[in-house]
Amino acid sequence: MRTLVATTGRILRQLRHDKRTVGLLIVVPNLLLTLLYFMFKDVRPPIPGAPSVFNGLALTMLGIFPFLIMFLITSIAMLRERTTGTLERLLTTPLRKTDLLFGYGIAFGLAAALQASLACLVAYLFLGLDTKGSPGFVVLIAIGNAVLGVALGLLASAFAKTEFQAVQFMPVVVLPQILLCGLFVARASMVGWLQAISDYLPLTYSVEALEQVGKFTDPNGTMWRDLAIVLGCVVLALVLAASTLRRRTP
Amino acid sequence: METTAIEVKDLVVNRGKREVLRRLNCSIPAGSVTGLLGPSGSGKTTLMRAIVGVQIVKSGSVQVLGKPAGSKPLRREIGYLTQAPSVYPDLTVRENARYFASLYGLGGDAADEAITICGLEDHAGQLVGDLSGGQHARANLVCAIVSRPKVLVLDEPTVGQDPVLRDELWAYFRGFAEQGATLLVSSHVMDEANRCDRLLLIRDGNLIADDTPTAVKHRAGTDDLDQAFLNLIREGEAVPS
């Protein structure tokens, strides 16, 4: 437990020294949401009286941004641990592998909580985002997505030898999930085999959970089930990532 | 004093298709400073990695303090300094030291003490990434000694350091050994080899000398350790084993 706290603190301190990254983490999602707002400002909803196109897109984006950004920074951070030898040194100390993985999950999860809270604040207060359910659930799902991004990033870093390779896992791991999550084409309108694939992609469930918050005042069973599926994927990815951390290497 | 801290038996290590260590045997007495010498590529780092338990070995055994290398209880007892600095460049010296200390359940005093030993007290608040090359290497050493391990494996700890600091560091290594620690130090600098209790000389994955510096010089028929080293390396090359 003590080493987990120390590791989480260490990762947060590293982040704190990198002021530009912190700035980007906080500012970029808000700028993109604002951009989205103006893109759709004069676009009328398909059915008169329906919520604006921006409303649905912004809600989905509040889930996608933390997933995408945390995946990227985690896969690079973990790759650095592998290539600079700090990982090898850590594995000669009493640190448990899970302390390292959960340390990343908690540290970047906290960063994501800050990021998502600010993005929600901007979206609800200034951009007119409107959901039936509470913004608190949007933040909660966004944090879940961030932790999912961290877990997949930790796993993906095991398959990259260089930072060039690591960033290219973004289009491999993240983009298909964004394409198939129902953002571009409603899942019900996809051909059967694409729907089947999207059934196995975790982002599908977090986007569905966000839709539930948008449509219903109170959290419903679908939302909780979807959130549980996302967390299940997090645990699975972390277990797989732990198995790629070998104390002994060739 | 005469108990064995590290016992290597018939160690064979392959890296890729190359056999890096070839049935290597050696034993390192507890409470001593042992120098590990050999041309680059001879297998020094691989032997050190096998001793700290991060190297996949093909056959043979490595026992450290009577336990198999890399086993869990040993992780509290061993300190490993890699050749390339493996500290976090985006943390200060003190933050690095405190983090590694905390992994052993130690507090800030242990961290500050290690920083002082390595002569970095004036740079404790600086980011490691902003330090000079020599200071960077010392920050790396800080994190290896912070836990006061019983076995310290140091891969080229004094490379790039000025003579004054090198002398101080060796005085500290000697101090650790007198308190009962066992040190294995690889080096290229022969006047450092002279300060060791024992020398291991490896060439091409084979141990070609395991003796005191005096005995090594005697065997090579010279008073100069540099020359003794060259004689023994060439002697081995002339008569292929």
Image (cartoon, coloured by chain):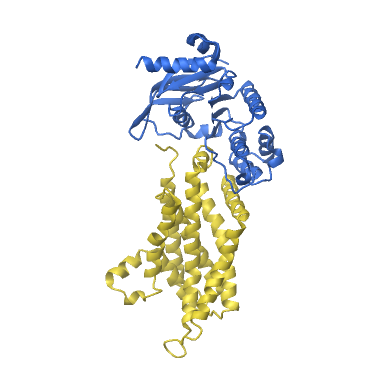
Chain colours: A yellow, B blue
Give above or below for B57 relative to A215.
above
Where residue A24 sits, quadrant-wise, is: bottom right
**Image quadrant in which the C terminus of chain B is located:** top left
Where residue B148 sits, quadrant-wise, is: top right
Residue at the limit of the structure toward the right, as seen here = B122
Residue A223: percent from the left, percent from the top? 46, 70
Give above or below for A80 relative to B9.
below
Question: What residue do we see at 31% from left, 67% from top?
Answer: A196
Where residue A236 sits, quadrant-wise, is: bottom left
Total labels: the figure holds 0
Q: Is residue A125 visible in the rendered structure shown here?
A: yes
Position of residue A80 in the picture relative to residue A195 (left or right): right
Give above or below for B236 relative to A109.
above
Residue A219: percent from the left, percent from the top? 50, 73
Residue B202: percent from the left, percent from the top? 44, 21
Question: What residue do we see at 51% from left, 13% from top?
Answer: B216
Q: Is residue A132 visible in the rendered structure shown here?
A: no
Q: Nearer the viewer, residue A112 or A24?
A: A24
Position of residue B196 in the picture relative to residue B64 (left or right): right
Give above or below for A162 relative to B35.
below
Residue at the limit of the structure toward the left, as seen here = A192
Residue A169: percent from the left, percent from the top? 40, 57
**Image quadrant in which the N terminus of chain B is located:** top right
